[in-house]
Image (spheres, grey):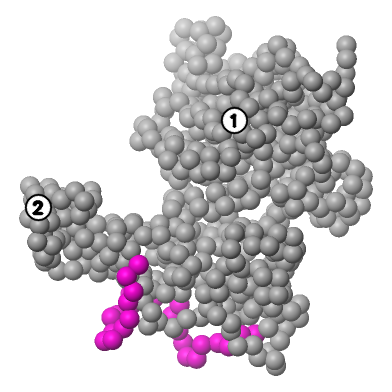
Amino acid sequence: MLTVLRVHLTSEIPVVGCEITPYVLLRRPDGSISNDDVPESTPLHGYCVRYRWYRNFGDQKFAICSIHPTEQATLQCLICLKEKVPISKSYHCSPRCFSDAWQNHRALHDRAKKILNENGADEEEVFGRLNVSGSGSFSAGLSAVTSNSGSVSLYPTTVADKSGEAWSEVGFSRTYTPTAEDINHVLKFECVVVDAETRATIGNVNTVLTSRVIPAPSPTPRRMIAVNGDPLAQLDLDGRISAGTFSVLSYNILSDVYATSEVYNYCPTWALSWSYRRQNLLQEIIGYHADILCLQEVQNDHFEEFFAPELDKHGYQALYKKKTSEIYSGNPNTVDGCATFFRRDRFSHVKKYEVEFNKAAQSLTDIAIQAGQKKVALNRLVKDNIALIVVLEAKFSNHGTDNPGKRQLICVANTHVNIHHEHKDVKLWQVHTLLKGLEKIAVSADIPMLVCGDFNSLPGSTPHALLANGKVEHLHPDLAVDPLGILHPTHKITHQLPLVSAYSSFARMSGVSPGLEQQRRRMDATTHEPLFTNCTRDFIGTVDYIFYTADSLSVESLLELLDEENLRKNTAIPSPEWSSDHIALLAEFRCKPRIRR
């Protein structure tokens, strides 16, 4: 006999677009206990489990804040209604909420004016028009909405069935993905064992009720800021300075393996779940309209099952290199790595190089480490980090070149460097190893280069100094950490690539504009790098970079930086709005004319 032992939900709050798969524990006919599915399509010994999802139509409707989805809305932006912004984006829970969000909220108005129905069709007005009170109006086109009488529990843990309550059947499988029609409604999940032949139910019907469904919070729009000599220009993400440019994104998306409630206990568990984060990350990444994507901490299974097929729908070709697993002892499918995507209509794939720092460590110890120290050296150097190098050919013309008929190649390196703070020597050695490999490619071809990734190194550290300056000063304090002697003589820790950090362009610009001045305040005046790219409760700092060869590329525009105060309003990231503990970096480049020799 097949028996349902236990049913529960893995997330306390259902979110539109994020599938729900309840945990169902079964006792099988042979006495074994498993949570493997036994659907009606494949019965086991004549029995199967029937699943049903229902939506409650008897519960009261009210609006939810677009910024704080666990708060009831009390205000609605009338400009959003006029400009036909999706109605769910128009609600706010308080005047302070609206005021804090105004700068980015206004971008929704601007975008709606330019691109009608940004997400396809108009979003259905799920709640209908709320009654507006003339006496309760606020500034900036904001009006109070009618509030619910009495105290209403917005997200009850359980909801008791009532006589005559109306439920509408909406799903027929174990997994269900809430839609916009479900917003603010409770869902009910039922499962029961049935006889596969007679269809008769066996035993009790197991029922679980969800909290109210909330709309998916969307990341705040970020603008591109021109740095090509026109500081007054502010570009939409789907716009360019002009033809012949291309854009590159670098983003550590936070692997699901590391996104635990123990580490990020300030983030709601529903917003930390992979079913939610993957949709939010995909929406954010697609919204940047980048030509090349360099993603870090992409799990192997998530690359194959989600990112590669989903980004393929948006015209991206995928390349991937997962970390080696000499140290990692977990599920091989959850090993993370670096994924590089490029738009097929803009580039074609020429060549791929894979850098395994473990192999480089083996070669180094064979040559430079005494026999008795090899094991100690490998224990320190072998960290499973990798780099993915891709050579692409541009399909677009680069206006202004003196030889437009010649192939335009671009080399893009994507890496994730060792995280351990105390292993400063290992970080520097990994970066130096990568740069020496890129130098070999540069010698064989006259090719612009981009070096992107999470370097786990602050501005001013030895890895950053090597990237930005081509060398490390021999008195740098980080060089004191060198137990294996692999960093000496220090005059050999160099490279000849003319690399410059893309975001340092904000600091170098001489123009004056409100947008540019705002970005400069978010830069470190000493290092000319962003104040942070990683913002958690316990750490805030810059560890992510996009470097480029300044003799062959120029920066045209940069994605605006985020404000620490806004990010930390909900403690830190990840959060319901931002699904990684890192922020994305995006730069638009132009290839410089080649100099004939």
Q: Is residue 463 left or right of residue 401?
A: left
Does the magenta-highlighted stretch encompass residue 496?
A: no
Does the magenta-highlighted stretch encompass residue 148?
A: yes
Query: Residue at (45%, 26%) from the top-left corner?
Result: 324
| Label of residue 46 in the image | 2
The quarter in which the C terminus is drawn is top right
| The residue positioned farthest toward the bottom in the image shown | 135
Q: Amino acid at mark 1?
A: Thr
Q: Is residue 463 visible?
A: no
Kindly report the distance in space between the C-alpha atoms of the residues bearing marks 1 and 2. Answer: 52 Å
Q: What is the crowding at mark 2: few (fewer than 14 residues within 10 Å), some, or many (at least 20)?
A: some
Query: Residue at (71%, 71%) from the top-left corner?
Result: 83
As drawn, 61 above or below 390:
below
Instruction: Identify the magenta region.
Output: 144-170
Along the viewing direction, whichever of 513 and 540 lies nearer the viewer: 513
Q: What is the crowding at mark 1: few (fewer than 14 residues within 10 Å), some, or many (at least 20)?
A: many
- Residue 487 percent coordinates (x, y): 64, 18
Element at badge 1?
A: strand
**Residue at the spot of label 1:** 415
Q: Amino acid at mark 2?
A: Gly
- Residue 11 percent coordinates (x, y): 38, 61
Q: Is residue 104 left or right of residue 379?
A: right
Along the viewing direction, whichever of 454 and 465 lies nearer the viewer: 454
Q: Is residue 365 left or right of residue 428?
A: left
- Give the main secondary structure of the magenta stretch: loop
Tag in front: 1 or 2: 2
